[in-house]
Image (tube, coloured by chain):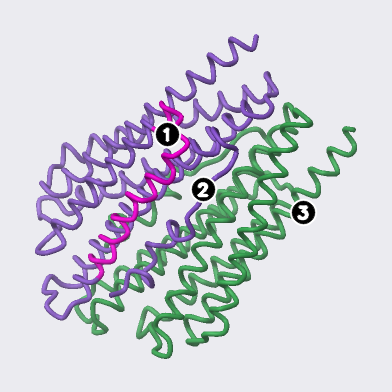
Chain colours: A green, B purple
Amino acid sequence: MRTTFHTELDELMTDLARMARLAAQMVINASIALHQSDIARAGLVVADRDQMNAMHDETERRCITLLALQAPVAGDLRVVVAALHAVGHLKRMGDLARHIATVARLKHPNPMISGKVRPVLARMGLLAGQLAEDAATAIEHQDPLSGCRLAAADGEVDALLRHLFGILFAEDWSHGVEQAVDAALIGRYYERFSDHAVAIAQQVCYVTTGWVSEPEDWETAGSPASCAP
Amino acid sequence: MRTTFHTELDELMTDLARMARLAAQMVINASIALHQSDIARAGLVVADRDQMNAMHDETERRCITLLALQAPVAGDLRVVVAALHAVGHLKRMGDLARHIATVARLKHPNPMISGKVRPVLARMGLLAGQLAEDAATAIEHQDPLSGCRLAAADGEVDALLRHLFGILFAEDWSHGVEQAVDAALIGRYYERFSDHAVAIAQQVCYVTTGWVSEPEDWETAGSPASCAP
């Protein structure tokens, strides 16, 4: 019974890692759609989000079934509770990638990113995808230090968001209000996406140590207050 | 044993309702701080956020203890799982209210909201506070219809966000890029705050029926894509 249970827990972790890789793929595709005004690529993200939601519902249902049938305690209970949290973060990452893809679709065929914000948003998209990949690896390896490592990488995303706001608020910004607002919101979506990846790694830390590391600043770094130049 | 367990579940619901009322108070105070450039009021929100985080940690710990010691099944398990989800939503609502208060602090003594966006953001703040109050009532009354009712009220928040973007992107917008970006992000915070209140009511629906109602559009209504005029 317990052997079967632990096999089920392993399968749960494998599926969470798969979802994290899907999130990585979604945010990378959303970035390509945005930068290349690629409407077909944006459509892929929308379709992947449906798949992510289906995986969320299925994985959450399995977590609840495990709680009901196995009544896990101690470390096993931590795994299931962490999976319940992680699956919510992954669903939200899918939503955020879809938001970015939806902007690309609505602005098509006009490129919506101009000037100095272009490389900043490109870098944020790359980092967001990498953080989701790292979260997948953290889940697979059950690495207790991954939470701190991802939080450090997430610091670059936060710094880029502050830099982005600096560009938008500078006197030489010449691309108008609408592009500025779009860029600010897209930057914010990347930043939140990255926060969720860090939160997943922190759940891995909780699974392996019973303790959640939570740097004070990771969840507030995206506020306009902290991003203002 | 079971009587004690059900007493503990009732206490859990009472504490969740208390947290929802704290979230309501936070977002109302953040709105006052923003509109009246009231730095002391903004400080209250920051302090309340610490209290919210402490209540989150304590309530989550109690949920996990209940799972470990009581191994609930069926309806009782649904209550604990819903509480685990709700407590995460409430913490995030506290973060969002704090984001708004932090803007008010950083812009002090300059009022940061001008012209036509002022009444729109004021109305969004009022509705966000009301939705958090409604979520508290839904928890207390275990009302299975509250999810749908709150989702309907949340529709007005989404419509206001679209209206806000219309104002910011109009040719007669004369308050510059920085105010536009700040207003867009604050509108987005109110909209996400309201989404979380709806999600809590949906968890109440899940507790009472075993089924989560999730209107397709409530979670994406705040994207710049859907908000563009």
Chain under disc 1: B
Q: Which residue is mark 3?
A: A14
Disc 2/disc 3 C-alpha distance (Å) = 28 Å
Disc 3/disc 1 C-alpha distance (Å) = 31 Å
Task: Tell me the amino acid under the disc marked 2.
Answer: Ser
Q: Which residue is mark 2?
A: B213
Identify which residue is drawn at 74% across, 55% down.
A15
Q: Are marks 2 and 3 on the same chain?
A: no
A218 above or below A4? below
Residue extending furthest bottom? A109
Task: Tell me the amino acid under the disc marked 3.
Answer: Thr
Q: Which residue is mark 1?
A: B53
Q: Nearer the viewer, mark 2 or mark 3?
A: 2
Asked if the stretch drawn in magenta spans residue B106, the answer is: no
Q: Nearer the viewer, residue B221 or B74?
A: B74
Label 1: few (<14), some or many (≥20) within 10 Å? some
- Find the magenta span and give its range: B138-165
